[in-house]
Amino acid sequence: MAEDKKSEQTLDALIVGAGFAGMYMLYKLRGLGLSVRVVDAASGVGGTWYWNRYPGARCDVDSMFYSYSFDEALEQQWEWTERYPAQPEILEYANHVAGRFDLWPDIQLETRAASAHYDDGDARWRIETESGEAFSAQFCILATGCLSSANKPDFEGLDDFAGRQFHTGHWPHEPVDFTGRRVGVIGTGSSGVQAIQEIAKQAEHLTVFQRTASYVVEAFNRPLTTEEQLETKAQYAELRAAAKSTFGGFSMSANDVSALSVSEEECRRGLQEGWDNGGIAFLASYNDFGLSEEANLRAQEFVRDKIREVVKDPETMEKLLPHHIIGCKRLCLGTHYYETYNRPNVSLVSVAENGVERITPTGLVTGGVEYPLDDLVLATGFDAMTGSISRIDIRGRAGMELKTAWAAGPRNYLGLMTNGFPNLFTITGPGSPSVLSNMMPTIEQHVEWVSDCIAYLRDRNVREIDAKLDAQDAWVEHGNEIASKTLRYSCSSWYLGANVPGKPRVFMPYIGGMPAYREKCDAVVAAGYEGFALTG
């Protein structure tokens, strides 16, 4: 054992993940004078934006607000080119940040964390990589991302497919040319919508295999002018502060009016205004789309009418009409998505009734019909929020396995720590607002809370911090209670883990909103880290 420990690299903190959360966590902990290392399986920084390189990959948050706010000089220097940033530009930004703050020396790429075991006696984490490298650290921080673990379905015959096969969440680095190819895309969620729009422009024929129709609102993406960038930068502090007061930390606030308090005609005018603003602002047109089925129906019908206006083929149009609660699945942003189905080289096939029966070497079979394909694109999403964590063998106090502690769904306190796993933090994990918010300010809030906590512990020579079981139970119960009062439970979504066979059906993100969450986190600190056990 002594020989093993000699070969360990001793650190104050080890961070898993070199996305925006991991990089900012490194920056903050280095500022405290800690020895820190970041490990990531990728060959570059950027996290989700490193892996998701599929055609059309783009953020659905305005670029000026999908950025760090912790450094004013960075804010003022960086220039975004479009309203909604494309993947290459976001990745360029991530690399710029890594260079600007000299983060590279402490980032170890092409290094996948395989296990993290807690040593009760030393009060330290021992982290091993797949290559056998070992680290010992007082603190282990999981910045593994919410949408970073690709969900590859277990279709019969998938490995026998003779053509090219791609997954939107694990796209090749080199450009993929679909010219003259018969392409099949499985999935019409956010990634599928974006990829379909672009692949259709190249492919000889594109066949889209859809299980559930999505609500796709027009993004109205456009280039940013120099003038509007300068105007935003001149008011950045005020605009950021205002965004933090909104439910999701976005740049726009919800209209504080019920859709049912106005006439149907007036409601449609408000919805049209929200539609014309572009993007997720549509669901902020009125304040009760997430609470009232009757109000929600008005928004549903508005989008269905948009589809009816655009899609020319009646049969295709009917397939594209979604009928679930709008907002219970992730709202998708598109650029002439529905117009894509008017192209003569695009076909839509519903797999809602028969599913994907099997993949053959030359195509896909559903409903007893084989569709010949040269290329297959799996836009089947992610094992969201917990997938990247569960792939690491994490064992806490007395060897307790995290996958056992989370067998019925993730349980933690504030989305930050799990009882029985001292000194192990998760950034934007389940139990926090995470995917229901603008990830950048959410990441900053989490990272700053964790770094402040670690500074507090070290100043007082505290060796361990652990979530108390009663505080954890109360937080999970609170999260479930407020989620149950919304319409989010009304359909099978990846928020509930419904896209992954065998995954417990638990609404994973905290749906109380960023202001309420931030207030709770601040109150916990003000009360001397109430709900946590601190051992000196």
Image (spheres, grey):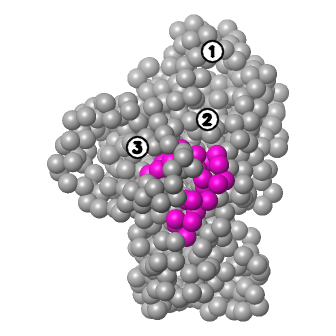
**Residue 483 picture quarter:** top right
Position above or below: 12 against 53: above
The residue that label 2 is drawn on is: 512
SS state under label 1: loop
Q: Tell me the CA gap for discs 1 and 2.
A: 21 Å
Q: Is residue 298 magenta?
A: yes
Q: Which mark is residue 529?
A: 1
Q: Amino acid at mark 3?
A: Met
- Which one is nearer the viewer's eye here, 178 or 231? 231
The residue that label 3 is drawn on is: 252
Which image quadrant: the N terminus? Answer: top right
Q: Is residue 8 magenta?
A: no
Residue 519 in picture, x, y percent from top left: 55, 23
- Which one is nearer the viewer's eye here, 120 or 464? 464
Residue 191 in picture, x, y percent from top left: 53, 65
Which sits earlier in the primary sequence, circle 1 or circle 3?
3
Q: What are the residue bounds of the magenta stretch? A: 281-304
Horizontally, residue 355 falls left or right of residue 110, namely: right
Q: Tell me the CA gap for discs 1 and 3.
A: 32 Å
Q: Amino acid at mark 1?
A: Tyr
Q: Tell me the CA gap for discs 3 and 2.
A: 18 Å
| Residue found at the far front of this picture | 263
